[in-house]
Amino acid sequence: MKNLNKAILPVSIGLLGILILSSCGAKIPKGATAVQGFNSKKFLEKWYEIARFDYRFEKNLNNVTAEYSNKPNGNIEVKNRGYDYVKNEWKESIGEARFVNEPTEGRLKVSFFKPIWSGYNVIDIDENYTYALIAGNNLDYLWILSREKTLPDSYKQRFLEKAKALGYKTENLIWVEQN
């Protein structure tokens, strides 16, 4: 009984920490707003990653894609895939996204390692859902996506200007090779 009491406190603190981490994860950068009138059905399927910051989990990857599909529970499956040009192998990661508020707001949280969730905020998208600017929890996470392997200059400038206005250091973006 004495050993059980000693174990309860650390386990309780650990569970509390996990709950706090998972609830804090779905943030949006200050000044950013998620797309209103968001249509998740139009957002589904395959996107090409055009630009990103240098994240540890995407280190040395090119030909990066993200595929979104509906799950039976109403959430969205996220399948990220990219080619590690250093190790000469494909890498894939499957996660899940949930809406933070209403499904008509492009504000989601995504998890690849439950119970840890992170903000995934669609902060700009064209009317045809062909090009998108995605913000993470803070100014360390940013993605530019396209349904095509390229991005027209007009959208590149539009997204870069918006990101700069929010405080992103866009000069640090990695422009992903897609071939």
Image (cartoon, rainbow, N blue to C red):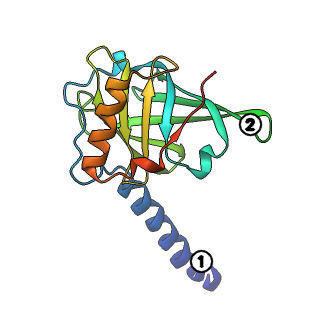
The relative height of residue 27 versus residue 33 in the rendered view (above or below) is below
- Badge 2 marks a residue whose secondary structure is loop
Residue 75 figure quarter: top left
Total labels: the figure holds 2
Q: Is residue 64 left or right of residue 12?
A: right
Q: Is residue 161 left or right of residue 47?
A: left
Q: Are marks 1 and 2 in contact (CB under 8 Å)?
A: no
Q: Residue at x 64, y 21 (%)?
A: 179
Give the amino acid at mark 2: Tyr
Q: CA distance from mark 1 to mark 2?
A: 46 Å
The relative height of residue 78 versus residue 121 in the rendered view (above or below) is above
**Residue 85's disc number:** 2
| Residue 17 coordinates in the image, percent (x, y) | 46, 67
Circle nearer the viewer, 1 or 2: 2
Viewer-side residue, 6 vs 54: 54
| Residue 159 coordinates in the image, percent (x, y) | 32, 35
| Residue 105 coordinates in the image, percent (x, y) | 24, 32
Viewer-side residue, 23 vs 179: 179
Estimate how packed mark 2 is, as few (under 14), some (14 to 19) or many (20 or more) residues with alpha carbons within 10 Å: few
Q: Residue at x 21, y 50 (%)?
A: 31
| Quadrant (top left, top right, bottom left, bottom right) of the N terminus | bottom right
Give the amino acid at mark 1: Ala
Estimate how packed mark 1 is, as few (under 14), some (14 to 19) or many (20 or more) residues with alpha carbons within 10 Å: few
**Residue 7's disc number:** 1
| Residue 88 coordinates in the image, percent (x, y) | 80, 34
Q: Is residue 117 visible?
A: no
